[in-house]
Image: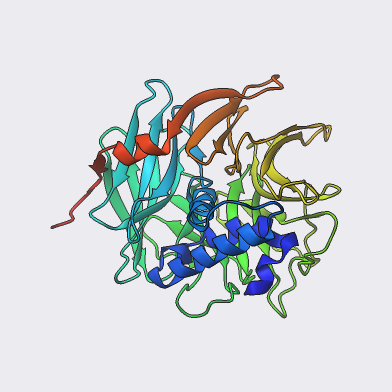
Amino acid sequence: MLALFRCDVVANARDVFSRAVLFAPRNRTLLKLAAVLVCFLEAGCIHAYASNASRLQKLVTGGYLTASSTNAAFYVETSSRTDDVILIDFKSKALKKLSSHGRRLGYPSLSLDGERLLLVRQDPHTGESELLSCEITNLICRRLFATKLSIVDPVGIGADRIVYVSSDPGARFDYADNDLWLFETGKEPRPITDLQFHVLTRLSVTSSHIYFSALGPHPGKEAIPKYKPLEDASSSIYRLPFDSHTGVVTVPATQLSPLFVAERSKSNSPSIAFDETFAAFLRTDRYRKGGFRFDLVVQSLTTSASILFKSAGIGFSRPVVVGSTVVANDLLDDRYIIKRLLPGKTSLQTEIEVTDDEIARLPATEIIIENESR
């Protein structure tokens, strides 16, 4: 496990910990250990232990951004046993802190029209996870299904289909069994790949492909190249042909090649325009003085021209392509700044700035689960 935190792979720590295993109480100490290791491996690290634990937590939870034309959401740790979701209305700038009776809420995913919000709710005592579909207007949620397996990165791909990542977080701790799963209304969830990646996250569905970040491969399932931490240039971004109407993933017979590889850097966390005309993703400069940082890249897929936006703080969240714009959360030590790139522009505009103190003072808004008795 410690090998994952060599200096050249610190940039992957967020992907490793942004899984449902983070919900498990037994892994909270591992998160703190990771924070210490990240601190040690970053050049010039002079912050206190608690500060770095907070930084890594912010990269994990605040770094998991979802957005629509009207809203944005990310989640925050509110106690050792609870995570809440921060929901932001772009027009009114109003904030809500969504909670659910002491359970963990995470992995928010907004529909493009901003009318529905997918949430993963987990009971910290039993470890059972539920996928919820909530109406934004009244925060009434339907329980789609419950499972002892993990539910990560749910993405709605139609009125009755959701693709997500799942594994068994309690069976083993080598991250060797992550696959794509499909939920269809009226049917049991089912796996649609058998790749058993060590890490699989950051799903982005287009008209014909599903893009993702992955590390691996599992022995005997070499769908992607073996990770080489000392490579000068690398990427964890891959894509597979995907039919969103049937839920069928096509796994080529040949090994997948990483995308968006650039000299002296590592790329991850893709978000791709539905028509695949441009992409947004994160990139780190492995030779940057002062340690790694997640910067934002927006790249044309027709001309390969790209723009790099440097974070003003500790790094950007996963970017989200919303129509022809890109939305990202610039993460600072004491606040979140949600920014948008408009078509044809070369600079980011600030949508809203939210401080940690504001979030701490924000009263909780309990979501309502249909047919749930208390």
Residue 194 left/right relative to 121? right
The image quadrant that residue 238 belongs to is bottom right
Q: Residue at x 71, y 61 (%)?
A: 9
- Image spot of residue 207 (x, y percent): 63, 42
The image quadrant that residue 149 belongs to is bottom left
Q: Nearer the viewer, residue 260 or 338?
A: 338
The image quadrant that residue 14 belongs to is bottom right
- Image spot of residue 224 (x, y percent): 75, 65
Locate the C terminus and report the quarter of the image it occupies.
bottom left
**Residue 266 showing in the rendered view:** yes
Chosen colour scheme = rainbow
Locate the N terminus and report the quarter of the image it occupies.
bottom right
Is 272 situated above or below 256? Answer: above
Q: Nearer the viewer, residue 345 or 81?
A: 81
- Image spot of residue 137 (x, y percent): 29, 32
Q: Residue furthest left?
A: 374
**Residue 276 showing in the rendered view:** no
Q: Nearer the viewer, residue 360 or 369?
A: 360
Q: Residue at x 72, y 22 (%)?
A: 346
Q: Residue at x 40, y 65 (%)?
A: 188
